[in-house]
Amino acid sequence: MNFDTYDFNGKKALVRVDFNVPLNDQLEITDDTRMQAAVPTMKKILADGGRLILMSHLGRPKNNEPEFSLRHLVNHLEHLLSTPVKFADNCVGDDALDLTSGMQNGEVVLLENLRYHKEETAGDEFFAGQLAEHADVYVNDAFGTAHRAHASTAIIARFFPHDKLFGKIMEGEITAIDKVLHDSEKPVTAIIGGAKVSSKISIIENLLGRMDHILIGGGMAFTFIKAQGGNVGSSLTEDDKMELALDILKAAKEKGTQIHLPTDAIAADAFNNEANRQTCAIGEIPDGWMGLDIGPDSVEQYKQVIENSKTILWNGPMGVFEMENFAQGTVAVAKKLAEVTQTGTFTLIGGGDSVAAINQFNLADQVSYVSTGGGAMLEYLEGKVLPGIAAVRE
């Protein structure tokens, strides 16, 4: 069922959004990216003459602490939608149902934090049924929680056998990742960075054979280098993953994926921005020094591969980009991705650090797609079935 062609006129649409936004001590929103992302979905339902009922979690409340109330989001939501928003003090129960059953076309109700009920994360079917009573149609637009089998993301869809849809965020995320994994124009390249091999093993294994090239950066590169006999000084390594690193390199050869490792690194004598720095061959880092970024030769090599690719996934930074003196590799990759996007290459940015980097360098609007998914995107890239997606597709 297609969201754009579905007619919401006169229907109560229960939309699972991801409004898990950061709040400061004054309970003011400090980053509304997730709320902004949901605006097209919300506005389409209202424009059709639908009745918009929104549900979300916020934080991880233990005892229904007031600082986790979605009430704090009402004013900003009214601003984003340019329309009044009614607030329900609970997400289930008679009072909440009275509020939603009395709605007129074009009205908006925001339900209280789903996680004030432990049944939400437990995936409780009775609780999901209570939520379902609010509406005629269910829309899941919370990709960030799609990997969780929670009541509001996976179980609730059973109560809407014929009227369940993905919202525009979900559709966009699924289309973008599927394009890289299953429908990519070749050559297709994955740029995988970050601190540890262990956190990216499943992704790399799932990409072998699908990707023409995998560029490795960040701290995880040093485990591969050390496994091959290189000297990495006091760089971050996972010694218990060295054999696995060699297995990955062997499997890549067998499956026709070329893995590129850095050839040089920017090394420092301490983990801080003001440390002494030197550029050295990746397998010749002196004792007491640690690699904190890929070096200039690696940057040029990686830029060359990026330039010759037609589809690119970027997940994980090339170095400690939060420190200006070790951000060069990550900046170079981000800029090159923005550049090739303008000439028709499809570029998907995903994973918290890559998204943070592309935003920090003000390049988010110059790449094809920036995933809001985090953990959900990583699990999808690993080839796992996400409960929130499966429930709507069933």
Image (tube, rainbow, N blue to C red):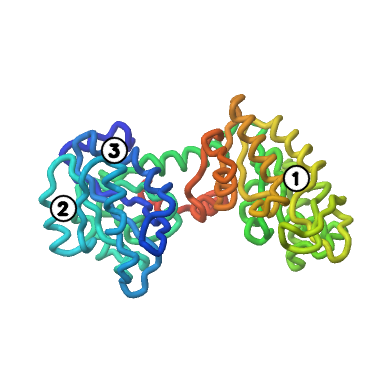
Label 3 crowd (10 A; few <14 / some 14-19 / many >=20) = some
Q: What distance separates the C-alpha of mark 1 from that of mark 3?
A: 44 Å
Mark 1, mark 3: which one is toward the viewer? 3
Identified by mark 3, the residue type is Lys
Residue 91, by quadrant, is: bottom left
Left or right side of 245 for 339: left
Q: Say which residue label 1 marks.
A: 259
Question: Helix, strand, or loop for circle 1?
Answer: strand
Q: What distance separates the C-alpha of mark 2 from that of mark 3?
A: 18 Å
Question: Helix, strand, or loop for circle 2?
Answer: helix
Q: What distance separates the C-alpha of mark 2 from that of mark 1?
A: 54 Å
Q: Is residue 181 visible?
A: no
Q: Say which residue label 3 marks.
A: 43
Task: Give the x, y percent position of residue 82.
Answer: 26, 40
Identified by mark 2, the residue type is Thr
Sequence order check, earlier mark of 2 and 3: 3
Mark 2, mark 3: which one is toward the viewer? 3
Label 2 crowd (10 A; few <14 / some 14-19 / many >=20) = many
Left or right side of 283 for 92: left
Residue at (36, 69) in percent of width and height = 61
Quadrant containing the N terminus in the rendered view: top left
Residue at (38, 52) in percent of width and height = 18
Task: Give the x, y percent position of residue 96.
Answer: 17, 59
Q: Say which residue label 2 marks.
A: 100
Q: Are marks 2 and 3 in contact (CB under 8 Å)?
A: no
Residue at (71, 45) in percent of width and height = 328
- Looking at the image, which is closer to me, 255 or 227? 227
Q: Is residue 114 above or below residue 338?
A: below
Residue 79, by quadrant, is: top left
Residue 113, by quadrant, is: bottom left
Task: Give the x, y percent position of residue 305.
Answer: 73, 35
Residue at (87, 50) in percent of width and height = 281
